[in-house]
Image: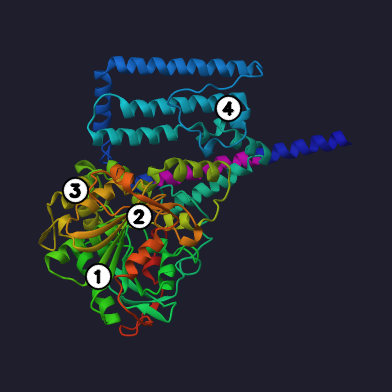
Amino acid sequence: MAKNEEEQTLIEQNAAFVANMAEVYDTSQKIWTRFLEAQNEQGAPTNLDPLNTMPAWVELTRTMLDHPQDMAAETLRYWEAQGKLWQAATLRWLGAPDATMPELPHMAAAGKRFAHKEWSENALFDYLKQSYLLTSGWINHTVHTVGEMHPRDRKKAEFYTRNFVEAMNPANFFALNPEVMEATLEQKGENLVRGLHMMLEDLERGKGQLLIRQTDMDAFEVGRDMAVTPGKVIWQNDILQLIQYAPATDKVHSIPLLIVPPWINKFYVLDLNDKKSMVKWLVAQGYTVFMVSWVNPTEKQKNETWDSYLTKGTIAAMDKVLEETGVSKLHLAGYCIGGTLVGTLMAYLSKRKDTRVASTTFFTAQLDFADAGELQVFVDDHTIKAVDEEMEKGYLPAQKMASAFNMLRSNDLIWSYVVNNYMLGKDPFPFDLLYWNADSTAMPAKVHHFYLENFYDENTFAHGDLSVLDTPITLADIKGPVYHVATREDHIAPAASVYAGARQMEKAKVRFVLSGSGHIAGVVNPPAAGKYQFWTAPDLSPVSLQDWMETAEETPGSWWTDWDEWLSERSGRMVNARTPGAKLGTLEEAPGAYVKVRFDKQ
């Protein structure tokens, strides 16, 4: 009887596996059909190399051919290393008790994608892992070091090479990933069924393009779980809403603070939740805080320009802040591209002898783009033309920008989710920061073109060739007190690049601060968390950031307290707390309607 029950169980398991595989096949067909429909709707691509990678590959090939001896030596070292690896693996397969994988040159770090025990305990999978790490490390090292190349070509070749080797990671393939194979056997293929249903849903959300979810998209809601600091929308036009936050103290500094966030992402990264919110913390320190909430643009914003984002955007918001508070000066803070906009504004206001800004703060804002990080690989004359073609409706679709940012960290933001979601069939973990990261925005075409051409491609602000509002401006035109924050591990606004821009503000009194961590965590670092550290040094005469670091003083914890001390000294007397919209009136509760518009639900 027990044998019959065992046979019956086996039959049922096999039947379940067959049924799941049939559903996998059916769902795969639906995915493929939806993808082809999207391709037909878009038509055949007119540009087969929109990112203009071919010149970099041609230059890399030429460089390799020009250095045959170096290439031969590197290739010999690679195969010697592979031989040692194979020897160690063979000994392990034969059961040698002390067989261990050797330390080999240029091997890449294993990382968390090889965390499953089988990658180390199983001799076959361990060899597969080690061989990949050796090969990928060797490829990346060779591209980085061979011969002489133009820095921009080298950077582009390195970037796309890294993305290629990350795509070739054995963990990305069903038959080579022990964790996926184990889950498939244990769950009789149900993981693949769940995963492909998830893929089909993501394909629909992306309107035919795969929009990989990085978190539970139903776990959060803007205005309910995040962006919850109390306040009111007190004014708006067709490109922004102006939020005034409610006071948390009886007395406040007389000079208010206006924050200009990036329009590449949404402002609520500065107000994620009660524990992480910079806005809430600033209000608790007695500041009257105003926030620009940019519109998520459509064809209605097709005629907006960098100049209109200055006039209808920041200048209009400044006017309303001063009108609402009844004072003559305000503090201005800009984050990322919002800081780039603020930088051009401050240079323009200086030329106009407009002194309404009491101080300026920059959060990871690039102003000198000579070495502007990995995003620069996407920008040259050819790619700008390709982007212009993408923006024929007057705006760049949000998914294009989201894809570019995800490529900067493809292992973490693409491939790990491909495996977790589509192969293992697991729902992504609810994470507020990744929800915000997925809440992408579109770009107004003319604003975006101006940004790419004048900053990333030609670096006109640093070179003294930029004009805004019919006024020539340079970085040296910026005056007044400046608090300038860079983050040490920033891959979007590299700290050395931010430092180079700060040094060119010859007429300003700059306090440069280097924070630990990266573009987001280095900025959104509340003091209560007790994380990271920051460095300060009053002298900006050292030419390089590295030289500046030699004299800088390290302080544990968040730079927010240092900024508060600096800002409070310039914020005037204490006055009675201000009710939001007391003069201008209120339109709706914060965070307002503009920030809630999602491109994948338009």
| 58 relative to 116 in the view: left or right | left
Q: Nearer the viewer, mark 3 or mark 2?
A: 3
Mark number, residue 125: 4
Q: Secondary structure at mark 4?
A: helix
Q: Secondary structure at mark 2?
A: helix
Q: Which residue is mark 2?
A: 398
Name the amino acid type tagged 2: Ala
Say few, some or many: other residues with alpha carbon within 10 Å of mark 2 (under 14 / 14 to 19 / 20 or more).
many
* Dominant SS in magenta: helix
Q: Which residue is mark 1?
A: 358
Say few, some or many: other residues with alpha carbon within 10 Å of mark 3 (under 14 / 14 to 19 / 20 or more).
many
Q: Nearer the viewer, residue 96 or 103?
A: 103
**Where does the C terminus fall, quadrant-wise?**
bottom left
Q: Which residue is mark 3?
A: 459
Q: Nearer the viewer, mark 2 or mark 1?
A: 1
**251 vs 157: above or below:** below
Mark number, residue 452: none
